[in-house]
Amino acid sequence: MVRTDKYISLDDIYRYDKLLDLHIQSHKVKKGEVFLKQGHKCDYFYYITKGLMRIFYFDLDGNEVTHWFSNEDMMITSPDSFYNDRENILNFEALEDCEFLLVTREHLKTASKNIPNFDVIYRKLIVDFTVALSRRVMSVHTESAEYRYLKLIKEYPTIFHRAKLSHIASYLGITIQSLSRIRKKLIS
């Protein structure tokens, strides 16, 4: 959900895995697979090494609402489920063939005990996530759809080649028709 490579790289994770004998597992999922579903427990931080994922939930009418997109060098989790051991309310879908590492609570505890400054790095990641989520929620109420569209393109320049228009429109909180109007206006 947030870029992690400014704090911890894939090479760092492999180095910590080897140094601490963590046995971090890698996992692959195929395009279209929903690999974490609402109602199940989320036991991992997923460090994405390849592909694009979509995190979504269902609104009161049963419609899918895209909550977030995440791609390479990002970590995602379902915070309430992961930290509080509660039932997950989100769904994680691979929009492309994806590969990721499965980081458990135990991995984080071991790293925290044995790696100098790991707690500082971890706190910075959590703060970045909290700020990003807060801004995301507020943006729907304080920014125009056009502005949210431009921010999305800046953050995910290839999103229109990687995700369905319906997912993008849902993420922006607009209809597909509104998305088409915005795109047409900005292109001409």
Image (tube, rainbow, N blue to C red):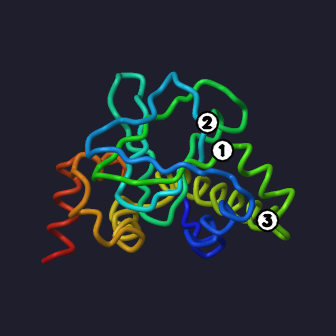
Q: Where is 69 relative to 149, above or below?
A: above
The percent position of residue 158, horizontal first and vertical second, equals 28, 69
Name the residue located 26 percent from the left edge and 41 percent from the top edge.
32
* Residue of label 1: 104
Which circle's residue, 3 or 2, is located before the other in the chain? 2
Assign a secondary structure to mark 3. helix
The percent position of residue 62, horizontal first and vertical second, equals 35, 23
Amino acid type of the residue tagged 1 in the rendering: Thr
Amino acid type of the residue tagged 3 in the rendering: Phe
Name the residue located 37 percent from the left edge and 49 percent from the top edge.
171
Amino acid type of the residue tagged 2 in the rendering: Asp
Quarter of image, res 116: bottom right
Pointer 2 local density, CA inside 10 Å: few below 14, some 14–19, many at least 20: some
Q: CA distance from mark 3 to mark 1?
A: 15 Å
Assign a secondary structure to mark 1. loop
Pointer 1 local density, CA inside 10 Å: few below 14, some 14–19, many at least 20: some
| Pointer 1 with pointer 2, Cβ within 8 A | yes
What mark, if any, has residue 43 been given in the picture?
2
Which circle's residue, 3 or 1, is located before the other in the chain? 1
Left-right relation of 23 to 52: right
The percent position of residue 113, horizontal first and vertical second, equals 86, 56
Q: Where is 67 relative to 159, above or below?
A: above
* Residue of label 3: 118
Q: If the image is split into quadrants, where does the C terminus sit?
A: bottom left
Assign a secondary structure to mark 2. loop
What mark, if any, has residue 18 been given in the picture?
none
Q: Where is 81 relative to 154, above or below?
A: above
